[in-house]
Structures are given as structure tokens and as C-alpha cells.
Image: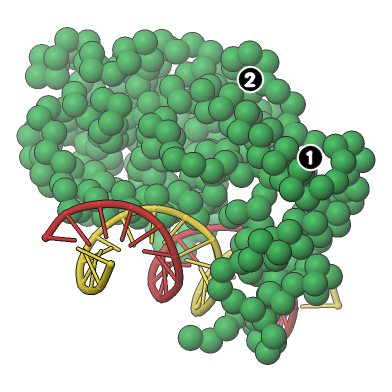
Chain colours: A green, B yellow, C red
Amino acid sequence: MGHHSCCNQQKVKRGLWSPEEDEKLIRYITTHGYGCWSEVPEKAGLQRCGKSCRLRWINYLRPDIRRGRFTPEEEKLIINLHSVVGNRWAHIASHLPGRTDNEIKNYWNSWIKKKIRKPSTPSSTASLTTSTAPIVQMAYNDSSTCQQLDFVNQDYIATKPEVQDQTLFSSTCPMFMFDTTAIDQLAVENYNARVELFQDVVSTVGFGNSDVPWNLNQHQVQALPPPPPPPAMDINYLPPLIENMDNMLPNMADHHQVLQSNNCNNMDIEEGDHHHHQDQMAELNEWVASQQQYSSSCSNFLFWDEMNSVVDDHQGPGSINIVGEDHHNVIVPATSSTTGAHAVLLSSFPSSL
DNA sequence: AATGGCCTCAACCGCTGCAAG
DNA sequence: CCTTGCAGCGGTTGAGGCCAT
């Protein structure tokens, strides 16, 4: 295997990072920032390529990194987001503050392996929405139209044919169930974790807590000082990505338009249509953020988008079967097997964005 | 205690997109 | 428009730990 162009130098070290190397990198980044990664190794006194330094910083040394096991809420969020955006780990990570794409990717891959080895055989549709099971439910009846069926759901549906009977709609695109209840909790947990980790790193590096010499530019670490605390359960406290989108958040009318525009029938997802794809991703970002806000501010919010609904006896009391010509986005009350107090969102984003 | 298989996760590789010249 | 360099992303690898035998 050939090395990256920046790693052609003879003395470039590879493999695991030593604590000394970590310290050098932390010291350099916290002092100078990282305007150009290719210059970092030399200036930091590291025999590594810039790319390696970048990876080490982003995936391990960043002060706002959050480590440890994924919480059930994070797991749900990953599953949900993966069903929407597929293997776009960076995008998924942007909705899991403190988590890296690498971490999520590793987690997902190991999770998938388990799924392959031990295919789940849920006993009912409702069981899908329990805290431990994938809460992604996909109505799917046209593989030629929606080719990149989410892997998990493919796995699930393959082992649960009756789900199709119960949940297939006239839609030609999949529908997803979204439990967005994890956001508030994550925001608070993340803040605490960020502060704690920041303090750890700072104490490790050994500089004072006040005059950290940041030469901030667009690439330099903006996580210092620690992020302001979220007001107690402030519904407006959102991860950085979401914060940046606050201004973009639509009012209800705009939101409605966004949802409308995500109708699969209106989506041109042909290969090569990159700009449109980017637009879709931007819309998706906006949409996810809006769902987070809506679910935070009105957890029992019920949103219908030109959908008809009927109570489906097959799915038990409280559940709603969606019947519609298209696959608009709706939030329906959670089934009795869920936490109940929160809404579940059905969306029509294809997994193959 | 030894060993082999499995799992996790840090790190690397190759590719793509973008911006500057 | 082309080339070059860089950042970022997703796929893959491999070391090391864990666990069952």
C-alpha cells in the first residue's frame, strides 16, 4: 500500500501514538491552533504526517470529545440518522456532540456484525419501538424505486415478513420512525462531558485556566473556554451544528415546505446530481434540527402533513397506521410500548441520499 | 496456563471536493 | 481550464484485549 503524499518522508512515524506524542500535539494545538495540518508535525516536533496529526486530534485529543459507551439514546439517534443518511458518518456525528465519525462508524460496524450473526425476530411491530430495539421502521414495497434500503431494516424486514403486511403503504419510498426524545438529555450530558474533558486536557497540558493563547482562525480550536452551560433543560440548547442552524430554522410554514420538498416523488436522487444532493442534505440538516426543536418544545406535538390516518387494530391501541398516496412526514403518537409521552416521527427521507 | 477466535477501536489508505494559483 | 495541495470523508486494517475452551 502506498503512503499518502504527505507521508512520503522517510522519518514519518506510524502506528499508535505515544503519550509523549499526544502531549506534544496537544501543546502545539492549544498554543498555536492548526492553520495548516501539513505544518503541524514539523512545528510540533512530531515525526508524523499532518494527516495523522489531524486524525489524532479530531478522533482522540480534542477537548470536546466525549468518550465511553454509547447511551441508549445515542444508539437510537445513530440508528435513526443512519436510516436517513446512510453511511454518512460525519453527518451522523454532527448530531451526536462529542462523538466522532470514526467512533460512530466503529460502533455501527460492530453493531451490524452482531445483527448479522443474531438476526432479530421481533414478535410485533410495536416491539420495534422499544428502547432496545431499532426504532426504525420502514415501509417498503418497491426495491427498484428505493434501491438502497437501509441495511438494518433490510435485515429486519427479511426476518419479519408480516411487518410488510402491516406497514406497507402505497408509498414508493421508505418511511422511518424517529424518536427524538434523546436530544435534551444528550445536550446536558454532552455539556457536562465537554467541561470535564476540557478540564482534564487543560490540566494535562498544564497551562493556566485563563489566558490560553489562542490564535483563532477558522481552523483553530473554538472549544475554549468551555462552552457556556445550557440553561436548565433549555430547549434552545443544541449541539454546535444545530446552533448554527438556529437562524435557518423555519417557522411552521417553512417547515411545512421543507417537508413537502422532501417528498420522494419530488426528489431527484439520480447519480451525478450533486448540487441537488447537497440541497437535500442541507434540507435534511434543517429538518433534523427542526424536529429536535419541535420535539423539545412540544414533546407531544402531533404533526400531520397531508396524510390520512386510520387507527390500525393490528398495531394495538394508540398506534396509527399511515395511509397516503405519498410519503409525507408526520409525527404520530408513540405506541404504547414506547415512552409514551413523546412523539414518534415518521419521515420519508430515502436512505440513499 | 495456553491458545485460538472474536471484538473493539485507533489508525491508515484512497478517494473526492474545493480553493488557490 | 488545468494543476496542485489540502481538508475531509468513508472504507479498511491490524494490534491488543477479552473470553471461551
C-alpha distance separating marks 2 and 1: 21 Å
Residues at discs 2 and 1 in contact (Cβ within 8 Å) = no
Q: Nearer the viewer, mark 2 or mark 1?
A: 1
Above or below, A51 against A208 in this view is: below
Q: Nearer the viewer, residue A177 or A124?
A: A124
Q: Residue at x 7, y 34 (%)?
A: A162
Q: Residue A211: where, in percent of width, then height?
A: 92, 40
The subunit letter for the residue under badge 2 reads: A
Q: Which residue is mark 2?
A: A236
**Is A35 displayed left or right of C1 in the figure?**
right
**Residue A288 percent coordinates (x, y):** 50, 33
Position above or below: A295 against A85: above
Q: Which residue type does callout 2 highlight?
A: Asn
Which corner quadrant of the image does residue A161 belong to?
top left
Residue A133 seen in the figure:
yes
**Residue A15, above or below A283:** below
Q: Position of residue A165 (x, y in %)?
A: 9, 33
Residue beneath the point at 36% across and 40% down? A79
Q: Earlier in the sequence, mark 2 or mark 1?
A: 1
Type of amino acid at the residue the image marks with label 1: Leu
Q: Quadrant of residue A159?
A: top left
Residue A252 x, y percent position in the rendering: 54, 18
Q: Secondary structure at mark 1?
A: loop
Q: Nearer the viewer, residue A158 or A72?
A: A72
- Please, which residue is most extreme toward the bottom here? A10
- Disc 2 is placed on an element classified as loop
Residue identifier under label 1: A224
Residue A157 seen in the current view = no
Q: Determine the chain carrying the residue at label 1.
A: A
